[in-house]
Amino acid sequence: MTAREADTALGAAAAALLGDRRLIIVTNRGPITFASAADGSLRPRRGSGGLVTALGQVGRHVPVTWIAAAMTEGDRRAAADPRLLRQVAGDDDAIRLRFASVERSVYEQAYNVIANPFLWFLQHQMWSLPERPVIDAATMRAWHRGYVALNEAFASAVLAQTRADRRPRIMLHDYHLYTAADPIRRARPNAVLSHFTHIPWPPSSIWQNIAPAIREGIAGGLLANDVVGFQTRRYAHNFLRMIESFVPDAKVDYDEWSVRRQRRTIHVRHYPISIDIDATLRVAGSRAARRRADELLGGTRERVIVRVDRLEPSKNILRGFLAYEALLQRHAALRGAISFLAFLVPSRTGLREYGDYGRKVQNAVDGINARFGRAGWRPVQLFYENDYAQALAGLSIADVVLVNPLVDGMNLVAKEAVIVSQRDAVLVLSETAGAFDQMADGALPVAPADVVGTAEALATALAMPVEERQRRLAKLRRGVEREDISWWLRRQLEDLAQLTG
Amino acid sequence: MTAREADTALGAAAAALLGDRRLIIVTNRGPITFASAADGSLRPRRGSGGLVTALGQVGRHVPVTWIAAAMTEGDRRAAADPRLLRQVAGDDDAIRLRFASVERSVYEQAYNVIANPFLWFLQHQMWSLPERPVIDAATMRAWHRGYVALNEAFASAVLAQTRADRRPRIMLHDYHLYTAADPIRRARPNAVLSHFTHIPWPPSSIWQNIAPAIREGIAGGLLANDVVGFQTRRYAHNFLRMIESFVPDAKVDYDEWSVRRQRRTIHVRHYPISIDIDATLRVAGSRAARRRADELLGGTRERVIVRVDRLEPSKNILRGFLAYEALLQRHAALRGAISFLAFLVPSRTGLREYGDYGRKVQNAVDGINARFGRAGWRPVQLFYENDYAQALAGLSIADVVLVNPLVDGMNLVAKEAVIVSQRDAVLVLSETAGAFDQMADGALPVAPADVVGTAEALATALAMPVEERQRRLAKLRRGVEREDISWWLRRQLEDLAQLTG
């Protein structure tokens, strides 16, 4: 399918699902957020992040009403001022932005007690379980009065936007919105509802550790949708098993990937997310990015290993450096002949675990540079900033791209890397990344705790003949081109139309 | 089935499997270990632990050759002196002890690098995964030259004891012996081999983190058996999924609970282990235990909560005390009216994690006693010693027994508690304990991280009318009586005979 054909198919899928309706998209973070300027006026600022980019696409084809949480005071003021929102949307009204607004304290409970430090940690298995989490009275309060209350506010906003429609089409996204479908379903029994979880879905044994009210709230909330989507087949399977374990009145059909409950059928599917290839190439091909790539290359030795990640414990950055250290130790010939460029983006700096982890990463880098570095050669170059163009520039000059997360819903860096590579990069990819399902054939696999194996994979990648590098990269590239962001979106729209038709 | 009938059935099952053979039992820790006395002679000492008690039973019915690791210098000397071993076995030769002996350094690698700090931690999910484990060169060396080498020594010892037999009957036990079946199978293709894992079997996502050589060694090693046994249905299922994930030439049949590989069929079963009821009652009914029960009761207030555990992070002792603290905080009427007796047995004191955890437990206890205690009332009484009779005495006087492990292969305290209770104890039991599968009906369930829910379960238990307590306890007691240690053993012997017949 050419890009134009794909575009047409996406438009057709959207039209088939929606008719003359607007598509309702609901996410925690919206495409635009508002900051108060010095003069008291509100200034819109484009949101970042893959999800916003991905979902923004659909606005090119069908009118979208996008409902996001009011995260800032500016957002809360804008929520109360429809004129302002209209003005931001521009003339074409392609994407109409609306806010779900709750009191700041409610949002704080939902976001800073439940979503990020609890659900994210739980689903990425980031705790030392003998001690954490501790589900105490404060946690339960934050669940009921923060998370569930925010989800009810999202539901109210959806209902307000779809008043005339008995069968609105609504797509809910990610771990902030597990319980929103339930109040929508009660008010609009015929609504067409989907939820997509962007992060991993762990096995039942992990859910079994937490309070029944929370895990049953999540399970029941998701079952109020018509389609429940995940990144991978395994996550979808884990969800089915969770339902079997914790929802006694639900009947799970593993062959059909569906759940029967209260005379409704819920379809469980997987849709691996991807990147907008044109947009990625546009940034990577910009003059600024190309200049930066040249500069970076000027500062490296012959061979270049690159990683790009948020500074995030689940990205397994520490063991990546341990593996590089083992590589230098075992392969003396590489010393002085290789550079490791690590582009790390600041993330959740307010959470203690992230600060602690960042210090350990810095110590590991300092240790390697002190142990192996010499005049004119720094084994690791660390870039700690949010500079997307620079990160793509780095990926473009890599001989080896290391993507070794402990666990990862998908991991788009792996996909960006094969698209922007200018030097036949070899991808070293964790088996536990969602992306591994699609990329196993071309990548070199590693188990995330296996530092020895990761060092060996790096050595194999560096020693690989250019023909094999090209063959692997071409295969990976074809895969990403075939299954891009438009494919991800289209399959969901098609399933929604077909499965609820 | 009466106790006598059960005994007869066990004897018949053993005879059907063995004919005139000896049963070969292989465990890391044997029923007897040797210490060097001051005069240089070797003194046998009876081993402790549930496994030794459980397997010792079978010696009453059929002749057993028991092969254990030489763990001490005394064991190594005894291994070289068959006369000494004969002398220990006594006249009837019911249990013939043999040692698998390897150099101390090899054993240290197997036991103190792989089995305890690695496999135990992995299978009980006791790590903070962003940082541990780190599988480095030392780990891989300990795996190959320690763990696998020790398993080969076990295999050699088995082969030496079964020289004349082309089809010996061999039962391997627990996480020290995952790879022993493989060399036995190669030397004796017709051997009848079973392995039973006493600890939890985690989901594939956990195994996926570690080095392929280790997880494939474990999977392949276990598949050299005819029957692979686990404590619960879920663990058996997790094993099947692991095989599907990591052993490409194996075909998994989920309906038949079997694996087909290299023209052999491997049966995967679950056999929940239990206690020797008579032996338990004998100790609990001893004069010493009854006196101790009276003394303990004399030092408590009206209502008594009891826990008995090794001091072990996976036992979730800390959150148990947090729940008790929440109980006292929310139910002021209980202050001064209740005692929490915690019998904690020292365990693996050489491992840093256990020491750290112990200090946190002590701090939690001190905190509660300081916060709520007053003249004449200590809210928590902590007993830190290995005194089995005292622990049973404690269980016998409990109103509520708290068994809230994070994860636990089975948990025999829950079963002992319902057998020795003199005061209609209510069992508060973690859903994640293996024992929960059999005891869900009578126990009050808790999710291990749910401190609020655990506090509520304790309150519910304390407020429960005596009729309901008796009804629940009677049901639990009938279950344990029906499915006791003899039942556990008999079903394995029967399956082995039938499935390999």
Image (cartoon, coloured by chain):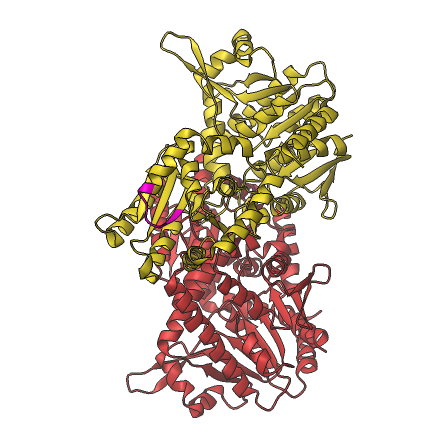
Chain colours: A red, B yellow
Please count the marks in the image: 0
- Quarter of the picture holding the N terminus of chain B: top right
Quick check: A263 left or right of A301?
right
- Is A107 contained in the magenta span? no
Which segment did they paint magenta?
B298-305
Q: Position of residue A146 (x, y in %)?
A: 42, 72
In the image, B13 versus B277, the foreground residue is B277
Q: Position of residue B379 (x, y in %)?
A: 30, 49
Q: Position of residue B7 (x, y in %)?
A: 65, 29
Image quadrant assignment for residue B490: top right
In the image, A28 versus B469, the foreground residue is B469
- Quarter of the picture holding the C terminus of chain B: top right
In the image, A274 versus B112, the foreground residue is B112
Query: Which residue corresponds to the image point at 50% horizontal and 80% vertical from the top-left?
Result: A67
Image quadrant assignment for residue B268: top right
In the image, A2 versus B95, the foreground residue is B95
Q: Position of residue A138 (x, y in %)?
A: 37, 65
Quick check: A323 left or right of B197?
left
